[in-house]
């Protein structure tokens, strides 16, 4: 089991490129199943979740090759329609393949995605929507057996919650369906727009992505296309939190300013100076941060739940009390106990976490329990006095492209110990 050894406190300086968005790359790779030609995806990050997704594509019969950050997928010879249990368990978000496999093969078999570190991860919205599109679903021994013998038919679907994954699954199932599908209360995240742009580039007809009503006109076929994945807004937020807590000035290259709009006001409230030139963002930290009165996670364009943990880590040494309300997932505070081991003062009551800023954090052995919580421990470790060892780095590798190399290039003293 690998761990990251961090010697703090340290200052960061210099510039770094933000990698492509994990949460865009995964549905885009699923979407490539629908194209009857070669798809070329640029700016795909080197992440374990992306590698698992590529394994699933190969299992289904796709030819997939990676050249640096470019992934080329040829889906002309698909012969399978199941996702192996092991791969489903390793990555819960494999559920997004369901809509794509059904659209292509008219049948699918996959095991129920296990719960994950953030609590139960229900898929009721996904299944209810697919049934409306004409899918028969049988659940047996933990497996879902899905079939659409009469094909998929467009329908109006209202989501009771703007679920990102359910919105993506409906888009992937509807883009080749007969007729028109209207999704109301759709997720508005940038990754939804990225997926719509890809599908339209491949010959699809998807309108309204980025708003809460998406209209998909089914088409006969999708051809291959070339697409560049959007930058990862959560990786950007994590690097900003690292700079903020260490009193540093750094420059992020390859960001999409609009995607960071829900996040940047929190850094300004903490006292950081931010300036954006084109696709570059520089941050100057004041050293001791102001507290952040209230961070409520919400669906986009609200504050993203994925940035909650890294930003909470940043506030642990602020000059005052910050309050977080986690409205999206029911158990997304597993990093709190570990931050307390580093000397943070945090109280959790249900969905509310109250962070009373302290003057110092001190290095300790801590354990990552999920992707963003693990990143939060690294952020805090950079500012803690002494050595911090973050265990279970595999969680961090799911969503950050060699985080230790990125931080080392900015001057951090951080090494991976296998
Ligand atoms: C996506 O997960 C992201 N993952 C998550 O990022 C992100 O936190 C989440 O969206 C919210 O932005 C990927 O894109 C691969 P949801 P997803 O469906 O699609 C409930 C990370 O760290 N729900 O919008 O699973 C669900 O329980 C990951 O990069 C249902 O009740 O999120 C949760 O409380 C973590 N029934 C809420 O909705 C359903 O059928 C949000 O889930 C589906 C979801």
Image (cartoon, grey):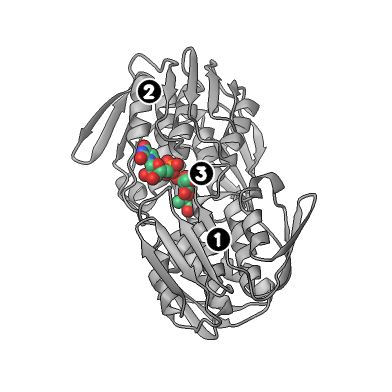
Residue 26 circle label? 3
Residue 218, position in %: x, y? 52, 17
Label 2 CB less than 8 angstroms from ligand 1 = no
Callout 1: SS: loop
Label 1 CB less than 8 angstroms from ligand 1 = no
Label 1, label 2: how many angstroms apart (C-alpha)?
A: 50 Å
Residue 293 circle label? 1
Q: Is residue 1 above or below residue 121?
A: below
Identity of the residue drawn at 39% across and 50% down: 329
341 sits left or right of 223 in the view: left
237 sits left or right of 167 in the view: right
Label 1, label 3: how many angstroms apart (C-alpha)?
A: 34 Å
Identity of the residue drawn at 52% across and 72% down: 316
Callout 2: SS: loop
Residue 345, position in %: x, y? 45, 75
Closer to the chain start, of discs 3 and 2, is 3
Q: Sort mark 3 into few (<14), some (14-19) or many (20+) by Cα contacts within 10 Å.
A: many
Q: Which residue is mark 2?
A: 106
Callout 3: SS: helix
Q: Image quarter for residue 149?
A: top left
Residue 312, position in %: x, y? 51, 64
Closer mark to the observer between disc 3 and disc 2: 3
Circle 3/circle 2 CB separation < 8 Å: no
Circle 1/circle 2 CB separation < 8 Å: no
Label 3, label 2: how many angstroms apart (C-alpha)?
A: 21 Å
Identity of the residue drawn at 33% across and 30% down: 127
Label 3 CB less than 8 angstroms from ligand 1 = yes
Circle 1/circle 3 CB separation < 8 Å: no
Closer mark to the observer between disc 1 and disc 2: 1
Q: Tell me the quadrant of ligand 1.
A: top left
Closer to the chain start, of discs 1 and 3, is 3
């Amino acid at each position: 089991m690998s761990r990251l050894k961090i010697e703090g406190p340290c200052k960061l300086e210099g510039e770094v490129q933000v990698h492509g968005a994990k949460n865009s790359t995964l549905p885009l790779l699923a979407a490539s199943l629908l194209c009857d030609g070669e798809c070329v995806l640029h700016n795909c990050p080197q992440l374990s979740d992306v590698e698992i997704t590529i394994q699933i594509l190969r299992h289904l019969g796709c030819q997939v090759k990676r050249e640096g950050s470019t992934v080329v997928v040829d889906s002309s010879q698909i012969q399978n329609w199941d996702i192996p249990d092991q791969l489903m368990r390793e990555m819960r978000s494999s559920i997004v393949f369901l809509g794509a496999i059904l659209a292509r093969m008219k049948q699918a078999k996959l095991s129920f995605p296990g719960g994950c570190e953030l609590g139960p991860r229900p898929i009721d919205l996904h299944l209810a929507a697919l049934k409306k599109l004409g899918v028969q679903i049988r659940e047996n021994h933990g497996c879902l057996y899905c079939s659409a013998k009469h094909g998929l038919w467009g329908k109006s679907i209202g989501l009771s919650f703007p679920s990102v994954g359910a919105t993506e699954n409906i888009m992937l199932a509807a883009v080749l369906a007969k007729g028109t599908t209207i999704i109301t209360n759709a997720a508005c995240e940038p990754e939804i727009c990225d997926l719509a742009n890809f599908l339209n580039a491949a010959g699809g007809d998807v309108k309204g992505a980025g708003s809460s009503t998406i209209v998909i006109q089914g088409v006969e076929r999708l051809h291959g296309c070339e697409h560049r994945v959007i930058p990862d807004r959560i990786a950007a937020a994590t690097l900003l939190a690292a700079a903020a807590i260490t009193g540093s000035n750094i420059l992020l290259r390859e960001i999409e300013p609009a995607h960071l709009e829900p996040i940047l006001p929190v850094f300004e409230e903490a006292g950081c100076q931010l300036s954006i030139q084109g696709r570059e963002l520089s941050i100057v930290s004041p050293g001791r941060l102001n507290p952040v009165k209230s961070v409520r996670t919400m669906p986009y364009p609200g504050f993203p739940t994925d940035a909650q943990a890294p930003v909470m880590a940043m506030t642990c040494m602020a000059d005052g009390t910050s309050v977080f309300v986690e409205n999206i997932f029911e158990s997304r505070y597993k990093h709190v106990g570990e931050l307390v081991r580093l000397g943070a003062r945090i109280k959790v009551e249900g969905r509310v976490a109250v962070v009373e800023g302290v003057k110092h954090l001190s290095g300790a052995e801590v354990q990552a329990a999920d992707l963003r919580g693990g990143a939060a421990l690294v952020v805090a470790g950079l500012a803690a006095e002494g050595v911090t060892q973050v265990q279970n780095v595999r969680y961090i590798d799911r969503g950050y492209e060699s985080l230790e190399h990125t931080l080392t290039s900015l001057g951090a003293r951080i090494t991976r110990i296998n």
